[in-house]
Amino acid sequence: QVQLAESGGGLVQAGGSLRLSCVASGRTVSSYAMAWFRQAPGKERELVAAFTGSTGSTYHAKSVKGRFTISRDNTKNTVHLQMNSLKPEDSAVYYCASGRYGGVYDKWGQGTQVTVSS
């Protein structure tokens, strides 16, 4: 059974930093496409960052490029999202997702709330 467990969300002031973690069980993070999505109230879920290939290539949305970085720790089977220079518009529930490269994300975590105050 595949489970994704996010942690690290919270309340932070604008300009601050947070690091989200996603611990995977039942699936090896280095063998699957791992991604971070976010959804703010009244908005559609959007892809924030992802590993796009087995070689470790990554994608970061334009809105977070240069501020957020996706990484993974294969020894801990964990994916991280380092978020720096946070803005109020980054406030959302952040979800970890997993799927096959080139396929759909079929496993999702429960989400972790990130709130950035101005």
Image (cartoon, grey):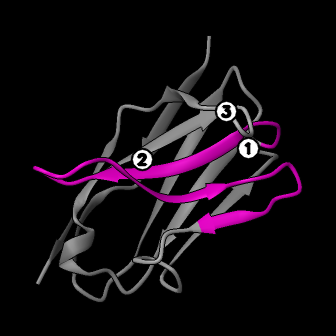
* Residue type, numbered disc 2: Ser
Residue type (three-letter) at the residue carrying disc 3: Gly
Q: Are marks 1 and 2 in contact (CB under 8 Å)?
A: no
Q: Which residues are magenta?
A: 30-59
* 74 relative position to 88: left or right: right
Q: Which residue is mark 2?
A: 7
- Checking the image for residue 76, the label placed there is 1
Q: Nearer the viewer, mark 1 or mark 3?
A: 3
For the N terminus, the quadrant is top right
- Residue 56 locus on image (x, y percent): 81, 59
Above or below, comparing residue 24 to residue 90 in the picture: above
Number of on-image labels: 3
Residue matched to label 3: 103
How many other residues sit within 10 Å of disc 2, few (<14), some (14-19) or many (≥20)?
some
Calculate the distance from the C-alpha at mark 1 to the C-alpha at mark 3: 24 Å
Q: Can residue 114 be seen at all in this image of the molecule?
A: no
Q: Measure how far apart labels 2 and 3 are at the Cα level.
A: 25 Å
Frontmost of labels 2 and 3 is: 3
